[in-house]
Amino acid sequence: MRKVVAAVAGDAALVPGELGTDIVGGTITSDPAKPTDLTFGLKLASLPAGGIGESIIYGWELLVDGAVPGGGDSGNLEWRRSNVTGLSLSAAPYIRFRSCAPDPNGQNTCTAGSQLPGAMDATTATLTATMKLGALSAQGGSLVGSSGISVYHGTGLLWFPGIASDDAAQDVDYVVPSRADSVQLALVPAGAPAPASFPVKVTPAGKTATGAYSASLPTDGLAPGAYDVVARACWGSNCGETRTPVTLS
């Protein structure tokens, strides 16, 4: 998980923050056991439970490598209590990715995708949504940013441009982790520090967090004796190391 939004608390306008309109932070998370998923989390000061509340809409405008996912004018991750006013019976809460692009007549047309896994958790005052990398036109190494995050107002059929209770910015781009070369190996004298760079890099097999891998470490020129195999595994910027003692004869 990486915190990518550090919003100011207590700055909600128009609709009081106690009704779920005050953005205080946001995160993007990638699980090595599910390397094709990204989970977005929008943290609010409070989030009342129950009710339709469709006039309060939460939107996270997404950019991937500086461009709108899939092209078009905008790509907005959207949360609402339900979509009764949008004339569709859908799971509550209503969590979709909405893409907008000009039609052949030059009119902007928006299309909502299918329901996304996620929640509007009143206990933690957090909104979550999980998207596939493919739906974002993203891959390992892609930069996921935003052109803006807001709590705006409208109904399921329309929204009121420029009328928002709170806005926030994504402070940093999120770098999508990759399994490629995510395990690094080195051979060092027993007890010696890990090297600044690792000579062998491998990609774990499978899609589990503990995928198997195999590799060969060069031993040319090394004297017989006690050594450590240092293995460093990383998922994004989170890394851990283990050591395995070996003896060269």
Image: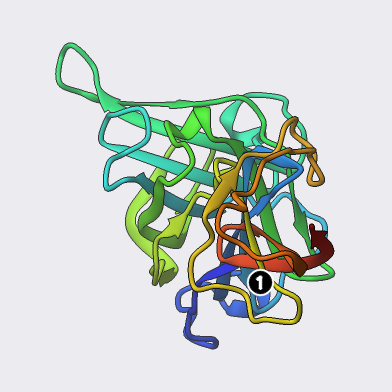
Q: How is the image coloured?
A: rainbow
Q: Quadrant of residue 248?
A: bottom right
- Residue tagged by mark 1? 19
The quadrant of the rendering that contains the C terminus is: bottom right
Report if residue 48 is visible in the image: no
Q: In which quarter of the image is residue 238?
A: bottom right
Horizontal side of 247 relative to 200 (left or right) equals: right
Give how far across and how far down residue 86 sits, in percent: 57, 31
Left or right of 8: which side holds 243?
right
Relative to 243, residue 30 above or below? above
* Quarter the N terminus occupies: bottom right
User: In percent of the image, x 52 and y 43: which residue is there?
Assistant: 155
Displayed quadrant of residue 243: bottom right
Eyeballing the image, is 192 above or below 36?
below
Q: Which of 77 and 16 is in front in this view?
A: 77
Which element is circle 1 on? helix
144 over 208 or under it: above or below:
below
Residue reaching furthest to the top = 104
Q: Residues within 10 Å of mark 1 (few under 14, many from 20)?
A: some
Image x and y of residue 156, in percent? 54, 37
